[in-house]
Image (tube, rainbow, N blue to C red):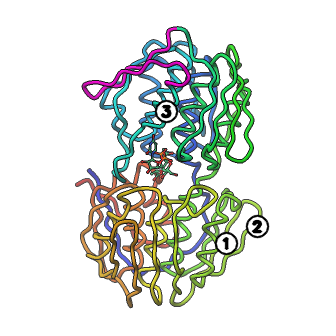
């Protein structure tokens, strides 16, 4: 267990390179199972979920190892098709190894995935889609046994909700399936397109337009030796925008992708920050009291991302006026509000809605990270607060943010890590 000790009320300034996308590198690592040879994935963030994915790959018989600035994965030999409970439970994304193993080995044995506690997070859409493709699925004793002895067949699948994980699982299962798979009402997040681009680089035949993805099954993939660079992490970029907005100062975020943040950046401008996007850079300047962002509704991409909800809420706790959040994606994604109230925030959360009334300032306190993005929001609140804060369960923050204290200290913050 880890904790972060943060001395607040310091301005944030300087420049930084944003990390590669957590929610892209994990599906790419699962997809490497289909490649049947060596692939090289660059711009991999040094986050704990990535190392969890490497442990799963090595357990399956692949070799996943660190090279100089990239991860090399050789999936030539798959020796196992089961993923033990302790590996599955480390993160939500482990569930998409199901599609990859079914696609490559026509069977797998997994348990229900872990990940942030944001509500029930069922996988019914994943399972019903794989059954439509010919998989036999038996669930019992907390395990999911899948098999497709005659191989998977392409199918036309309309998702009831554009689930990111279900879209990824279907793509992975369809790449080596017999015939054509069409996904309608598919997720449109940039991470989905990164997965499609990675698979096509390795010989898959996938086209996508709007919420429709067409996969033409191929016999095998041809692993490419070229280094494949993961897209920038748009949620980490939003998080550092919030750090600068809440603390005041000037920050240049480099190696990011502003066009992935069209629903996010205008909200910081609405709050009174000056933002300039040029090339792969975002410059933010925050001075004086922040204004309210009005009502923020989380939506599927290209709407405002649910993953940025908590980190946008943090600076608004000390803004002028009232902001209203409507969380439309997950049932239980306000667990950070209770911890923020310990720091003096005025937030009332009821069901999908949270009302944030700006206060003069927050004060340091002992708080506990409830999940990955809620933990990052508490870091933001602590950076702007008067006095010292201690954030426990910081290992949850490490799941999605690489070297957060090093980055922040380089930008003028005072953050120390201690084992609990
Ligand atoms: C991915 O989770 C991301 N995780 C999440 O990021 C992100 O919040 C989410 O997509 C939405 O953008 C990864 O990519 C590893 P969903 P996922 O399937 O795939 C319901 C972070 O902080 N649903 O799009 O689990 C589900 O309960 C994490 O980086 C079903 O009902 O999200 C939720 O309410 C958190 N049945 C909604 O759909 C299903 O079979 C969206 O879930 C699948 C999903």
Find residue 51 and report its horizontal and vertical position in percent.
44, 37
Find residue 391 and report its horizontal and vertical position in percent.
30, 64
Marks 2/1: CA–CA distance: 8 Å
Q: Residue at x 35, y 63 (%)?
A: 416
Q: Residues within 10 Å of mark 3 (few under 14, many from 20)?
A: many
Asked if the residues shown at circle 2 and circle 3 are in contact, with their CB atoms under 8 angstroms apart, the answer is no
Q: From the viewer's side, name the closer residue of 327 and 104.
A: 327
Q: Quadrant of residue 124?
A: top left
Dot 2 or dot 1, earlier in sequence: 2
**Magenta span has 121?**
no
Q: From the viewer's side, name the closer residue of 173 and 366.
A: 173
Q: Please, what secondary structure does the residue beneath circle 1 have?
A: strand
The residue that mark 1 highlights is 283
Q: Please, what secondary structure does the residue beneath circle 3 have?
A: helix
Mark on residue 96?
3
Instruction: Give the vertical position of 416 relative to 83 (above or below).
Output: below
Find residue 280 and report its horizontal and vertical position in percent.
72, 59
Mark on residue 278?
2
Instruction: Give the vertical position of 109 relative to 209 (above or below).
Output: above
């Amino acid at each position: 267990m880890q904790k972060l000790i943060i001395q607040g009320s310091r301005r944030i300034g300087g420049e930084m390179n944003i990390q590669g996308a957590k929610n892209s590198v994990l599906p790419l690592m699962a997809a490497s199972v289909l490649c049947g040879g060596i692939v090289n994935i660059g711009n991999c963030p040094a986050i704990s979920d990535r190392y969890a994915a490497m442990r799963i790959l090595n357990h399956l018989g692949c070799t996943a190892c660190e090279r100089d600035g990239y991860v090399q994965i050789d999936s030539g030999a798959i020796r196992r098709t089961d993923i033990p409970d302790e590996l599955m439970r480390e993160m939500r994304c482990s569930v998409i190894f199901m599609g990859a193993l079914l696609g490559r080995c026509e069977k797998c044995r997994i348990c229900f995935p872990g990940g942030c506690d944001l509500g029930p997070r069922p996988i019914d859409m994943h399972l019903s889609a794989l059954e439509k493709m010919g998989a036999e699925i038996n669930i019992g004793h907390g395990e999911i046994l899948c098999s497709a002895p005659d191989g998977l067949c392409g199918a036309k699948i309309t998702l009831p909700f554009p689930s990111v994980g279900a879209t990824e699982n279907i793509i992975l299962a369809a790449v080596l399936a017999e015939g054509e798979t069409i996904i309608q009402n598919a997720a449109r997040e940039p991470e989905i397109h990164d997965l499609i681009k990675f698979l096509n680089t390795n010989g898959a035949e996938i086209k996508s337009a709007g919420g429709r993805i067409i996969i033409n099954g191929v016999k095998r993939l041809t692993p490419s030796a070229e280094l494949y660079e993961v897209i920038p992490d748009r949620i980490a970029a939003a998080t550092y925008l919030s750090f600068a907005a809440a603390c005041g100062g000037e920050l240049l975020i480099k190696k990011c992708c502003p066009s992935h943040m069209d629903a996010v950046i205008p909200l910081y401008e609405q709050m009174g920050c000056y933002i300039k996007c040029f090339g792969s850079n975002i410059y933010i300047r925050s001075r004086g009291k922040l204004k309210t962002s009005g009502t923020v509704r989380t939506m599927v991409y290209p709407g405002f991302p649910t993953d940025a909800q908590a980190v946008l809420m943090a600076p608004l706790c000390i803004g002028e006026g009232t902001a209203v959040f409507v969380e439309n994606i997950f049932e239980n994604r306000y667990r950070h509000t209770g911890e923020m109230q310990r720091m003096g925030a005025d937030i009332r959360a009821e069901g999908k809605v949270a009302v944030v009334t700006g206060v003069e300032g927050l004060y340091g306190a002992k708080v506990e990270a409830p999940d990955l993005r809620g933990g990052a929001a508490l870091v933001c609140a602590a950076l702007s607060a008067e006095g010292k804060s201690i954030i426990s369960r910081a290992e949850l923050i490490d799941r999605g943010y690489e070297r957060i204290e090093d980055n922040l200290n380089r930008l003028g913050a005072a953050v120390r890590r201690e084992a609990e």
